[in-house]
Image (cartoon, rainbow, N blue to C red):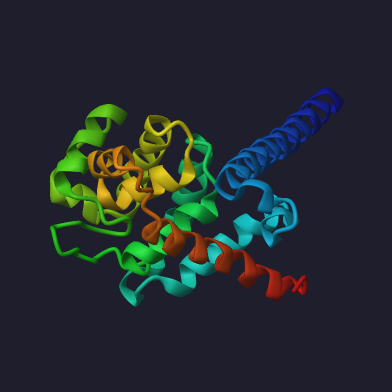
């Protein structure tokens, strides 16, 4: 009996240690990506002031508040997808939320002017291509109307763009909106697209300011 109690305690301690370790990894990934996006301005910014546990808790709250009534029952798996997929691809989840906010205002039913679908406004041809890269099931437009699947493909696409543009934040963020070919063509003319990156970064900082106000750091 004592042995069983001891083993149970050890399993519990290992579980706690693993949870803390995962939180630490996610925190470091977030910081690395935030520094990439913000450069020297990161050090004195509000983005540097929070631990991952506080941010994750706030993500669940934001998603629950902003989803349309029809999707509020799915808020938890959607928020979890934002957190997990961001960590999987070494992105700040608040950056992913900034993209979602700008693209669809958290409306999984949003349809764009050239056929973009869902939370991250992915074109079906891009979604099908990314599903091949990620080795995930593709069921046509239905896949992109599923908020969790939409996030998985959208974050994977952001990660792919990040690699393609060698971590140049302004370029891979612009490419999410314009497409990589258009960005490369612009850069060849010594033009660095900035409108969409500015749009995303304003929302990114706004999310951090929102949690800052709640915690009394602003």
Quadrant location, the N terminus? top right
Q: Write down the quadrant of residue 109 in the picture.
A: bottom left
Q: Residue at x 56, y 69 (%)?
A: 206
Q: Residue at x 29, y 45 (%)?
A: 186
**Residue 75 visible:** no
Along the horizontal axis of the image, is 73 left or right of 53? left
Q: Reply above or below: 66 against 20.
A: below
Q: Nearer the viewer, residue 51 or 71?
A: 51
Q: Write down the quadrant of residue 26 in the picture.
A: top right
Counting from the top left corner in percent of width and height, residue 185 is at 25, 40
Counting from the top left corner in percent of width and height, residue 127 is at 22, 42
Along the horizontal axis of the image, is 191 left or right of 33? left
Q: Residue at x 55, y 47 (%)?
A: 37
The residue at the far front in this view is 189
Q: Reply above or below: 64 against 12.
A: below
Along the horizontal axis of the image, is 188 left or right of 59? left
């Amino acid at each position: 009996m004592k042995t069983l109690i001891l083993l149970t305690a050890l399993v519990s301690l290992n579980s706690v240690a693993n949870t803390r370790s995962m939180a630490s990894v996610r925190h470091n990934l977030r910081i690395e990506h935030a520094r990439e996006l913000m450069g020297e301005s990161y050090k004195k910014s509000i983005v540097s002031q929070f631990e991952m546990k506080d941010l994750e808790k706030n993500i669940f709250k934001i998603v629950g508040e902003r989803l349309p009534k029809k999707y509020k029952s799915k808020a938890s798996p959607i928020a979890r997808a934002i957190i997990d997929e961001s960590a999987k691809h070494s992105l700040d989840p608040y950056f992913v939320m900034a993209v979602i906010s700008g693209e669809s205002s958290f409306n999984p039913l949003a349809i764009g002017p050239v056929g973009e679908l869902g939370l991250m406004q992915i074109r079906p041809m891009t979604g099908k291509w990314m599903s091949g890269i990620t080795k995930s099931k593709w069921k046509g437009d239905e896949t992109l109307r599923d908020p969790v699947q939409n996030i998985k493909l959208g974050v994977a696409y952001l990660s792919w763009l990040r690699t393609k543009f060698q971590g140049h934040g302004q370029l891979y963020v612009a490419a999410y909106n314009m497409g990589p070919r258009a960005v490369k063509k612009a850069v060849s003319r010594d033009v660095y697209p900035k409108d969409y990156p500015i749009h995303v970064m304003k929302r990114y900082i706004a999310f951090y300011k929102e949690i800052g106000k709640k915690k009394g750091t602003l």
